[in-house]
Amino acid sequence: MIPYILRRLLEGAVTVVTLAVAAFFLLYLGARDTARNIVGQTASLEIVARKEAELGLDRPIAVQFADWAGSALTGDFGRSWFTGEPVADAVVGRLPVTLSLTIGAVVLSAIVAIVIGALAAGRRGAADRSVQILSVVGASIPGFLLALILVVIFALNLGWFPATGYVRPEASVLGWLATITLPVIALSVGAIAAVAQQVRGSMIDALRLDYVRTLRARGLPDRRVVYRHVLRNAAGPALSMLGLQFVIIFGGAVVVEQVFSLPGLGQSAISATSRGDVPLIMGVILVTAVIVVLVNLAVDLAQAWLNPKVRLS
């Protein structure tokens, strides 16, 4: 298992480095206009050239990348071109907000999807058709539209939750839960639909296997057969889907954070992209890539634990 983990970590490192190189060259090749945006459109060419020299944009791009990569290896991702804030501080300060939304949505999606997916697989008929219809509807609603609907109904009309803002858990756990509840629901509906369909399909296939008929013939209760044996064997594809949904939810948090005015990584990424703040964009890209790699590794390890055949391969 350890060689497998090391191999996957090496593959992940290669992926992150390749993405960093591609993103750096693409972003910095178009960064010349950023110097003018910083000093103003009416600034003289001399002032623009001075700002480019200050940012290091007057040097060969290969030299710029070598300097940036050397600093990045030590945890120094530079400073924001517009605010002067260290990129590492900007990312670390906003990452917990986005992770709390993403992890909350993934946990909620997993719990609800397993319950309704197992229900649809075990009770074919009206319950199955209802779950499929709800899954299609849930997958069809964009996250940002659902977020707006939730704000209007539960925040503005009913007043149950705050419409905007974020309370950190160390300040108030209840306040934190109140500020993330609606965003988490908005992010999780699409994932619930996708994972529930995967659970349903995998469990239906597993219920047709010979070992299930053998277990039932031995007199094991149907609930025990379904939830202890069938669900575990059907968990592999569902877990892969859940890992994919983690990445989708993490990306969807960019828009949802804007709707609820949450100070997360998505809000920072949008503002940095609109201004051309390349160091901050690079920091967000790198952190996102590392998180995706680690999540994929965690999913693979969980599948190896669930399925001995995966472990052997």
Image (cartoon, rainbow, N blue to C red):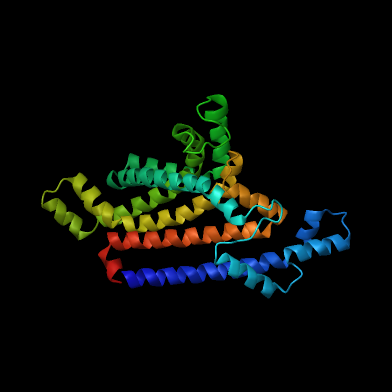
Residue 38 position within the rendered picture, expressed as x and y whole percent measured from the top left: 78, 54
Q: Position of residue 214 (x, y in %)?
A: 15, 56
Residue farthest toward the top in the current orientation of the protein: 158
Image height of 151 relative to 7, above or below: above
Camera-side residue of 236 and 251: 251
Nearest to the observer: residue 30 or residue 145 = 30
In the displayed structure image, the side of residue 277 where residue 117 appears, left or right: left
Q: Looking at the image, which is closer to me, 35 or 119?
A: 35
Whether residue 180 is visible here, answered yes or no, is yes
Residue lying at 82% horizontally and 64% vertically, measured from the top left: 49
Instruction: Residue 142 in the image: state x and y as whole percent.
Output: 55, 45
Please state the horizontal and vertical placement of residue 17, each as a whole percent of the image: 54, 70
Q: Quadrant of residue 149?
A: top right
Q: Residue at x 47, y 43 (%)?
A: 189
- State the residue in front, 192 or 311: 311
Q: Quadrant of residue 32?
A: bottom right
- Is residue 32 in view? no
Check the picture and name the quadrant holding the N terminus. Answer: bottom left
Is residue 90 positioned above or below 69 on the image?
above
- Residue 140 is left or right of residue 85, and the answer is left
- What residue is drawn where x is 26% and y is 65%? 308
